Each structure stands twice: as structure tokens, then as C-alpha cells.
Image (cartoon, rainbow, N blue to C red):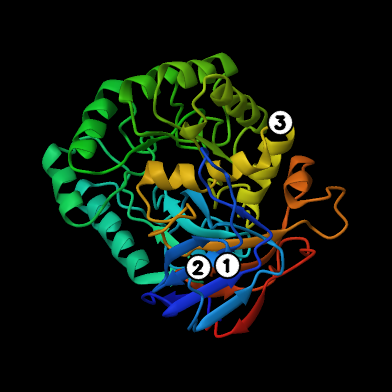
């Protein structure tokens, strides 16, 4: 399969997946479903339940899950794409398609900041955002859905600029604080303009990510009141824990934990969200590509980290990586429920893990093995080339292409 492909509509007319050993829903309220079969039509889920209760006749694509675990495709809430499947940050090709092999089916841009010569004038930054939104809307690397076009706001922008961006199809702001707008009062005004026009905002949290960027402290984060507290565990350098704790307590916004951040603070923040009874606020990302590279298994590593060290049941942490993000980001994926996109990752316990089941192995800190990934009802990869080998993998009995 080519690394970059134009967007394909729909998918097989009818897809049936049977013999699912364990079905993870992505929904914190009911993370495990009493079901073994999924029916999808046109790339959307039509039925979820027991095979005997569903209409499985006439499937163009039939998959035997072989007793493996099915979960919604993982959603990376924080990436920095540039052009197609190339990142100038590490001069690396194929990073998005490689991340597909880590179970990620959707990525959310936190700004196309690594473009060489990135324009910082208002006309230029708007042009870049609109171009990125159009390009990734038209073209999916490896089939992965990349929600891009996230402008870095700069001093001098007016409400009209945000209105213009929204009318052009831009739905995101890049990390507030990566541009010249760093004061809380300035950020608050622009975040409010963005929200008024349907654009979701994320704010950089913590110390400088690279030379030339700056500190965004807890007071700025609270005053700006962006929709997502971006990498609350730092990207890479975290705020002091007492400040992170204050953000968890005083803000009601999304708590984003990333791989390219302080792992200790990620664990503590996840625990705090559980104690504060707001696990629905926790979303996960990688914050890659970055100085530490690209992590094709970064999302799985975050799930294993939080499950094992924060002692949160693995089925709940998978919700952080799927349904929580889908709801906060307004995406039609991330949950196994009727009407949602048929984006799935099939997993099983890695061969020779100490865990008796997939969930137990993740709770012990091991990564799962991926046997297949589907996007909009289309098989996008089989046994992952990047994860440890899964004990059982799905089998395509008919169709699938």
C-alpha cells in the first residue's frame, strides 16, 4: 500500500466482524461491551451485539477476529504534521503510516509549526492553516485521518481573522503560546473569538519546547481558558506538580497527557483526574514529531504507562485514547456505537507476556500486539510491523480491499 493515498469514500458496502473475544467501547460509562460481532455499512457502524441477534447476511467483507480484542482506533490528540507523510523536524518519511501500525487511525494537529520558514504574518499564517486543512482533508497518509490546519496565533489578529478562518473550514487553533501571543489577557480574548466562531483551542503548558519558544505558566493557562490544556505534563518540561494540580482542580477544560512530556507528572495528573472524579477530561497524545523523534507506538506506550504506574484499569485508559478525545474534539469516531465511523484496532496479548489476557498484560506494563487496523471499514494494515507479535490475529475470510 502506498504511504499516501487520496481520501476514499465509504468503504465496503457491508462489513461483518465476528468472533470478537473482547470488545472495548471507548466509553468510560461502559468500557467493555457484551458483544462479539459488529456490522458496518458504508464505513459506518450499523449494529453491535451478539452474532445471533444481528443481520450478518450479504457481507462483502467478512472478518473472523479469531478471539482477539477489538477497540476503537486510537486518536492522537496532539501531533505536528507539515506536508503529507514527511516531517522536516526529523527529516523522516512515512511517520504517519508507521503510526497507523501503532493503532492510530486519527490525528489532531496542534499546529503545523515545523514548516521551514513558517509564515508569522497574519495573511501568511491564515494561508498556511487553510492550506494544511485542505491538503489533509483531501489526502490521508496510509489512510489515517489527520485533522489539520491549526494556525499559531500572533499579535495583531482581530475577530474578523478568526471568522475568516472558520468560514474557510479551519476548526482548530495551534498551541496558544507558540507565537507572539503569550500574555493571558491577549490569549483569553483570541480564544473567545475562536470559540465564538466554532474553532477549538489548545494552549501550550510548561517550559519552552525548543530554543526560541517560551514558558506558559499556570496563571496564563487559567486566564486564557483554552478548550484543551495542551500537554499538561509538559512538552517536554512540566510545570511544578502543585501548579499542574491547580490546573486540574480550577479548570474544567480537557487535560491532555502526552508521550513527549514528563512521565511522572502524566501519572500524577491521571491519578488526580480519577480522584477529582473527572476522568472524562483526560485525553492522550504524543506531541510528535518532536526533538525526541516520532513514536509510532507512542499512544500504546501512554496507555501502558498510565495503566501500570497510575494503576488505572486498562479498559478505562483505552477510553482516554479514544472516546474521550472523540467527544472533546467533536469527532465521529472513537466509540463503538451505531452511527460512528468503522475505525477499529484489533489487538491481543503480545506473545510471551506475563499477562494472561490483553488487559492484564497492559496493566503489567507490556504493549499489546496489533493484528489489524481498519479505517472507515477498510483494512489498512494487517499484523503490525511495529508492535510485538500478537498471540492471535484476525483473518479476512472474504473481501477486505
Circles 1 and 2 in contact, beta carbons < 8 Å: yes
Q: Which residue is mark 3?
A: 311
Q: Secondary structure at mark 1?
A: helix
Label of residue 51 in the image: 1
Q: Secondary structure at mark 2?
A: loop
In depth, the one of 135 and 178 nearer the eye is: 135
**View extreme (front): residue:** 52
Taking the image as drawn, is residue 290 in sight?
yes
Label of residue 54 in the image: 2
Alpha-carbon distance for marks 1 and 2? 5 Å
Please state the horizontal and vertical placement of residue 242, each as a whole percent of the image: 56, 14
Residue at point 43%, 26% (across, down): 216
In depth, the one of 50 and 168 nearer the eye is: 50
Placement of the N terminus among the 4 image quadrants: bottom right
- Single out the mark in the foreground, 1 or 3: 1
- Mark 3 burial class by Cα count in 10 Å: few <14, some 14-19, many 20+: some
Alpha-carbon distance for marks 2 and 3? 36 Å
Please state the horizontal and vertical placement of residue 160, each as a whole percent of the image: 11, 42
Q: Secondary structure at mark 3?
A: loop
Residue at point 32%, 44% (across, down): 173
Please state the horizontal and vertical placement of residue 278, each as a whole percent of the image: 49, 26
- Single out the mark in the foreground, 2 or 3: 2
Q: Earlier in the sequence, mark 1 or mark 3?
A: 1
Circles 1 and 3 in contact, beta carbons < 8 Å: no
Amino acid at each position: 500500500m502506498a504511504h499516501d493515498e487520496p481520501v476514499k469514500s465509504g468503504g465496503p458496502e457491508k462489513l461483518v466482524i465476528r468472533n470478537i473475544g473482547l470488545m472495548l467501547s471507548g466509553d468510560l460509562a461502559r468500557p467493555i461491551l457484551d458483544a462479539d460481532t459488529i456490522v458496518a455499512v458504508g464505513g459506518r457502524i450499523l449494529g453491535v451485539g451478539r452474532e445471533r441477534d444481528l443481520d450478518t447476511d450479504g457481507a462483502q467483507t467478512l472478518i473472523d477476529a479469531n478471539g482477539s480484542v477489538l477497540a476503537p482506533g486510537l486518536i492522537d490528540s496532539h501531533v505536528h504534521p507539515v506536508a503529507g507523510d514527511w516531517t522536516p523536524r526529523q527529516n523522516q518519511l512515512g511517520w504517519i503510516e508507521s503510526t497507523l501500525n501503532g493503532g492510530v487511525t486519527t490525528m489532531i494537529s496542534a499546529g503545523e509549526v515545523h514548516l521551514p520558514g513558517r509564515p508569522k504574518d497574519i495573511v501568511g499564517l491564515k494561508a498556511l492553516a487553510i492550506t494544511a486543512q485542505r491538503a489533509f482533508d483531501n489526502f490521508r497518509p496510509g489512510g489515517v485521518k489527520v485533522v489539520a490546519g491549526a494556525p499559531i496565533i500572533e499579535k495583531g489578529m482581530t475577530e474578523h481573522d478568526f471568522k475568516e478562518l472558520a468560514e474557510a473550514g479551519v476548526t482548530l487553533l495551534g498551541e496558544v503560546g507558540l507565537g507572539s501571543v503569550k500574555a493571558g489577557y491577549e490569549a483569553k480574548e483570541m480564544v473567545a473569538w475562536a470559540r465564538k466562531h466554532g474553532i477549538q483551542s489548545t494552549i501550550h503548558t510548561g517550559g519552552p519546547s525548543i530554543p526560541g519558544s517560551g514558558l506558559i505558566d499556570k496563571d496564563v493557562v487559567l486566564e486564557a481558558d483554552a478548550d484543551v490544556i495542551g500537554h499538561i505534563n509538559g512538552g517536554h518540561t512540566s510545570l511544578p506538580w502543585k501548579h499542574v494540580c491547580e490546573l486540574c482542580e480550577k479548570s474544567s477544560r480537557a487535560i491532555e497527557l502526552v508521550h513527549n512530556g514528563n512521565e511522572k507528572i502524566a501519572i500524577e495528573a491521571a491519578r488526580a483526574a480519577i480522584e477529582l472524579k473527572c476522568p472524562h477530561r483526560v485525553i492522550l497524545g504524543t506531541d510528535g514529531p518532536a526533538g525526541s523523534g516520532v513514536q509510532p507506538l507512542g499512544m500504546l506506550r501512554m496507555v501502558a504507562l498510565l495503566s501500570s504506574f497510575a494503576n488505572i484499569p486498562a479498559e478505562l485508559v483505552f477510553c482516554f485514547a479514544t472516546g474521550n478525545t472523540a467527544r472533546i474534539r467533536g469527532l465521529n469516531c472513537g466509540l463503538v456505537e451505531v452511527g460512528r465511523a468503522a475505525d477499529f484496532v484489533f489487538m491481543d496479548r503480545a506473545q510471551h507476556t506475563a499477562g494472561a489476557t490483553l488487559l492484564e498484560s497492559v496493566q503489567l506494563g507490556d504493549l499489546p500486539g496489533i493484528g489489524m487496523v481498519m479505517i472507515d471499514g477498510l483494512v489498512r494494515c494487517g499484523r503490525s510491523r511495529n508492535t510485538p507479535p500478537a498471540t492471535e490475529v484476525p483473518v479476512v475470510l472474504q473481501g477486505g480491499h
